[in-house]
Amino acid sequence: MVVFNGYLKLRIGEALDLKPTTVSTRHTVIFNKAPQTLDPYIVVKVDDYKVGQTHTKQKTNMPTYNEEFSLNVNDGKQIELAVFHDTPLGYDDFVANCTIQFEDMIKTSNTGETFEGWLNQAVCIC
């Protein structure tokens, strides 16, 4: 496995078409409530260590962040982007996540494709 050592600068642009999980919408079906909008934020982890978090965006399923995170990484293996919903009850706050291996980004960068294009595609998988 290839590890990454160096300076990482990551920009979180936006999240597209977020949907609440079935666990968090179980009460809307029971009580005939309107579909839920989210109060999403994104947690950034490197190798299961939290390195940052975006601001919470209120009542949207398509938040725009334009926030940057910069850090030095030693022996990094992966980045995880996890979307959460800021709820009064903490047990149904998870929305989606995406894990990106540094090894895959390094291989992609050697093909001439930009990180930005690659990451936009990867994040849409979430």
Image (cartoon, rainbow, N blue to C red):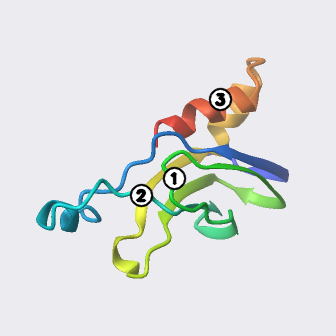
Label 2 SS: strand
Residue 62 locus on image (x, y percent): 54, 45
Q: Which three-letter amino acid code belongs to the residue tagged 1?
A: Thr
Q: Is residue 78 left or right of residue 32?
A: right
Residue 94 locus on image (x, y percent): 41, 64
Task: Specify few, some or many for label 2: CA neighbours under 10 Å numbering under 14, 14-19, or 20 or more.
Answer: many
Eye-nearest disc, 3 or 2: 2
* The disc label shown at residue 76, or none: none
Instruction: State the residue in front, 4 or 117.
Output: 117
Residue ID for mark 3: 118
Q: Which three-letter amino acid code belongs to the residue tagged 2?
A: Val
Q: Earlier in the sequence, mark 1 or mark 2?
A: 1
> Separation of disc 3 and disc 2 at Cα?
22 Å
Q: Is residue 85 left or right of residue 33?
A: right
Task: Specify few, some or many for label 3: CA neighbours under 10 Å numbering under 14, 14-19, or 20 or more.
Answer: some
> Separation of disc 1 and disc 3 at Cα?
25 Å
Residue ID for mark 1: 60
Q: Is residue 49 left or right of residue 8?
A: left
Residue 50 locus on image (x, y percent): 65, 70
* The disc label shown at residue 95, or none: 2
Is residue 102 depicted above or below 91 in this figure? above
Q: Which three-letter amino acid code belongs to the residue tagged 3?
A: Trp
